[in-house]
Image (spheres, rainbow, N blue to C red):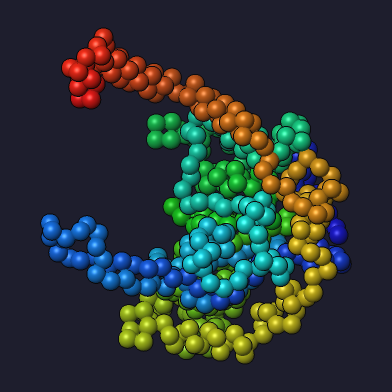
Amino acid sequence: MEIEELPCEEHHQILDVHIAGSSYPPFVLSFKNLTYDVKVSTKSGFPFRWKKPNVSSGNTTKSLLRGISGEAKEGETMAILGASGSGKSTLIDALANRISKQSLKGSITLNGEVLDSDVLKVISAYVMQDDLLFPMLTVEETLMFSAEFRLPRSVSKSKKKARVQGLIDQLGLRNAAKTVIGDEGHRGVSGGERRRVSIGIDIIHDPILLFLDEPTSGLDSTSALMVVKVLQRIAETGSIVIMSIHQPSSRILGLIDRLIILSQGRTLYSGSPSNLPQFFSDFGHPIPNNENPSEFALDLIRELEGTSSGTQILFEFNKSWKVSSMDDNDGDDTISNRRCTLPLKDAIAKSISRGKLVSGGNGANHSSSVPSFANPFYIELMVLSKRLLTNSRRMPAKFAVRLGTITVTGIVLATMFWQLDDSPAGVQERLG
């Protein structure tokens, strides 16, 4: 194994982990035949008064995912592309174990082993589409509070600070480190920087699996490109990055290693983005020069969805094209086809020993188990309370308004029940 240290400002370092001649293969997340159906109630259109409320006239089943398969490898970024309602977010949620297992059919494995829910929580991170941040905390403070909350007590304060500083450099936030997040009433960081802070909060423990729901949504092209470059750097440090994305630019498409295009819950393309021109050329719809391949693909899919046969012809072509084409290295050289020499938990322990899943130990005592919760409840409560007080203290006007509202409400309620006796009349007054 070769570990290369990338120098950063102020001697902060980011570990760049490369597997070279390792005795065990890198992590591979595989999913096969994922199918997810939900029941949709069809309510009566005539809600007469004598009918019971919410009585369904029948149930229909809607398929959100239909037999989706693929794999994502350590060190690579996978993007799930599709129009609204195609199943992008549902697939991300399925892989991240955020939907009911009883309703989900198919298999999801890591290095050939079924993922336990408790283990998945420890080794993964999920970044939501919306940025939910405290406006009056700086970028550095936001990440530091995340470190205090997510990293175990066995990690010293100095190591937590070093992790935060290294993460700031990795996210490209050095110039904004001392700037407050901001909101509508307070000037702060840009939209792209906010998104990178949101990513940083969830990867403070350096997870093996990173799931993101449309991380470029609402950003301009430059900010979106910066976010994807950050995700590429995160993948290069030994993580599996899987994200949903809507209509990426050509430059963003060039940073993605694997692409899945969905339509109505089915896979219409799976492979390298560089093979898109050849794929659509063989399909009989070559991509014009200087046109964004992702835009062309989505436009063509929308046209097919409007026809009587829908996207069935493209779905069938993708299956036959994938079998006949070996240009995307998904044949015998696929990592998932190699035999794993280590059980999953031992492989995770090896990953911890080389710097992943930041913990306070030296990695030698993690061979048989994976840590669960980083901190006890009272530590988490203290960190969250401190964060709330710090944010409120910097917004005195808003804090005063809230305090005044609570005080006035308390006085009004107190006077309503002042000196009520225990007579029947007093009881009636208490009941209103």
Q: In the rendered image of this protein, does residue 325 appear above or below residue 263? A: below
Q: In the rendered view of the protein, which quadrant contains the C terminus?
A: top left
- Residue at screen point 24% across, 16% down: 416
Q: Nearer the viewer, residue 366 or 135?
A: 366
Q: Of 91 and 330, which appears nearest the observer? A: 91
Q: Which percent across, then down, holds residue 164?
A: 68, 38
Q: Residue at x 26, y 9 (%)?
A: 419
User: In the rendered image, is residue 301 in sight?
Assistant: yes
Residue 282, horizontal then vertical, whole percent: 53, 88
Vertical comparison of 87 with 239: above or below = below
The N terminus lies in quadrant: bottom right
Front-most of 8 and 291? 8
Image coords of residue 25 (percent x, y): 79, 67
Furthest residue toward top = 419
For residue 56, above or below residue 401: below
The total of numbered circles placed on residues is: 0
Is 180 left or right of 14, judged from the image as shown? left
Residue pictured at 48% horizontal, 67% vertical: 103
Please name the residue shown 85% across and 65% down the image: 22
**Residue 281 in the image, given as x and y percentages of width and height:** 52, 86
